[in-house]
Amino acid sequence: MNQIKQYVDALFAQAEADVRGIGTAYRTNPVDGGGWVPGLDSKAKQKAKAVRALIAREKFNRNKPVDVPSLPLTKADREAMMSTPLGNLQALYARSLEHFEHDYDNHPSFARFAAGVMASPHAPDFIKSDPNLQKRFPARLLPGLGHGCYWSPGRPVA
């Protein structure tokens, strides 16, 4: 955890150095690509968000299926993997996890989330109709999975 915090500090320091002299107050979180404005948004919160994202990626990588790439942390990375149904499914998972503030310990696992997406009326048909995904992740309702395939605890089954 300490190494991750030091890494995030170094990334933010480099990002600060990269924008000096440009004259913009806008900053980009170097881990998740999100935008923030110093003075309006807390740098400490941005760093904490970055640390949570990297920890979530580390945990995901330890438990992920072998044919699934590392957890994408930016919108651009999620979009780049959307050329296949499995890639789309992983992008949905990463987006849901980001929405849940990268709380990997309380968010459903990738396999459980994928089975929930396969059962969701809100999931894209090209994902739900993929025979490989149907076999690999048999449809199973996931309480809390709602519109846009975002998971939230306490939300009833949609």
Image (tube, helix red, strand yellow):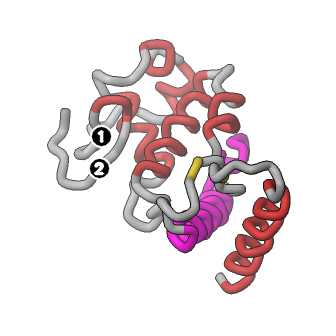
Relative placement, left or right, of 42 versus 99 is right
For the point 79% across and 73% down, which residue is it?
10
Residue 38, percent across and down? 57, 62
> The residue under label 2 is which amino acid type?
Ser
Query: Is 54 situated left or right of 89 in this image?
Result: right
> Disc 1 residue type?
Leu
Residue 123 x %, y %: 38, 23
- The quadrant in which residue 2 appears is bottom right
Camera-nearest residue between 110 and 27: 27
Q: Residues within 10 Å of mark 1 (few under 14, many from 20)?
A: many
The residue segment tinted magenta is 43-72
Mark 2, residues whose alpha carbon is within 10 Å: few (<14), some, or many (≥20)? some
Queried whether the magenta region covers residue 93, the answer comes back as no
Q: Which residue is mark 2?
A: 152
Q: Main secondary structure of the magenta part?
A: helix
Depicted 27 relative to depicted 53: above or below: above
As drawn, the label of residue 145 is 1
* Quarter of the image that includes the N terminus: bottom right
Residue 73 visible in the snapshot: no
- Magenta region includes residue 62: yes
Residue under the image location 64 percent in, 64 percent down: 54
Q: Position of residue 43 (x, y in %)?
A: 57, 68
Classify the position of the C terminus by image quarter: top left
Taking the spot 67% from the left edge, 58% from the top edge, the residue there is 61
The percent position of residue 17, horizontal first and vertical second, equals 83, 63
Label 2 residue SS: loop
In this picture, is 98 found above or below 78? below
The answer to which of 133 and 142 lies nearer the viewer is 142
Residue positioned 29% across, 49% down in the render = 152
